[in-house]
Image (tube, rainbow, N blue to C red):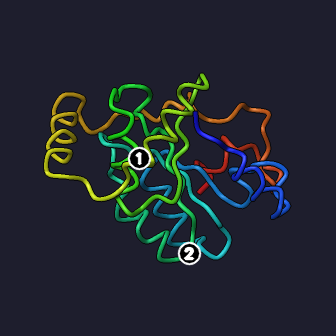
Amino acid sequence: MIDYSPLWKTMQARGVSQYQLLKNGIDNRTLDALKKAVEEYADKIETVMFPFNIVESQGTEILKLAREKGMGTICMKPMAGGNLEDWTLALKFIDASGVMDISIPGMGSAEEVDRNAAAAESFGPLTAEELEKCESIRRTLGTTFCRRCGYCAPCRGHQHSLGLPLRQLSPAL
């Protein structure tokens, strides 16, 4: 079992009382909207959230640009909607990509939280064997997992700090 008390103590010492994912950030489900946001609104946006995983890494170049401009990058759908069986490889792939600051894998149990936290112990460059396994997964699952259906979007009633419904931020760009 992972001991999370150091994390909570650090958060408390820094005055962090709640986790706000999208304080001054946006989530995008299309590469065009992400590109526009990064290129035109970098001075107003602190974070961008975009689907990124072994099977869907089309945003790599624009996410690099976001980081160069000082924006935080948040990986959504790191497990490709539950389609990736090797959790450690999935999270290691994201870490090794160099374009994501944090991943937000969905977790439904304490065991999944522990499994995700334990995966961080193997972070580092991908081995040749791991790279081949990623290619094999892509050959099996394809490279366009996300269908941009909006299912993973926050509920309609959730508001951004600017008072805009989160679902409307990305299409508006």
Question: Which residue is located at x 25 percent, y 53 percent?
Answer: 126
Q: Which of 54 and 69 is in front in this view?
A: 54
Q: Residue visible at 42% across and 53% down?
A: 31
The quadrant in which residue 173 appears is bottom right
In depth, the one of 71 and 171 nearer the eye is 71
On screen, residue 170 above or below 136:
below
The amino acid on which the numbered mark 2 sits, given as a three-letter code, is Gly
Q: How crowded is mark 1: few (under 14 residues within 10 Å), some or many (20 or more)?
A: many
In the drawing, does residue 57 fall left or right of residue 158? left
In terms of sequence position, does the residue under pointer 2 or pointer 1 come before the other? 1
Closer-to-camera residue (61/18): 18
Name the residue: 19% across, 28% down: 140
User: Which label belongs to residue 93?
Assistant: none
Secondary structure of the residue carrying tag 2 is loop
State whether residue 22 is above or below residue 67: above
Distance Cα–Cα, label 2 vs label 1:
19 Å
- Report helix, strand or loop for mark 1: loop
Residue located beneath label 2 in the image: 70
The residue labelled by disc 1 is 52
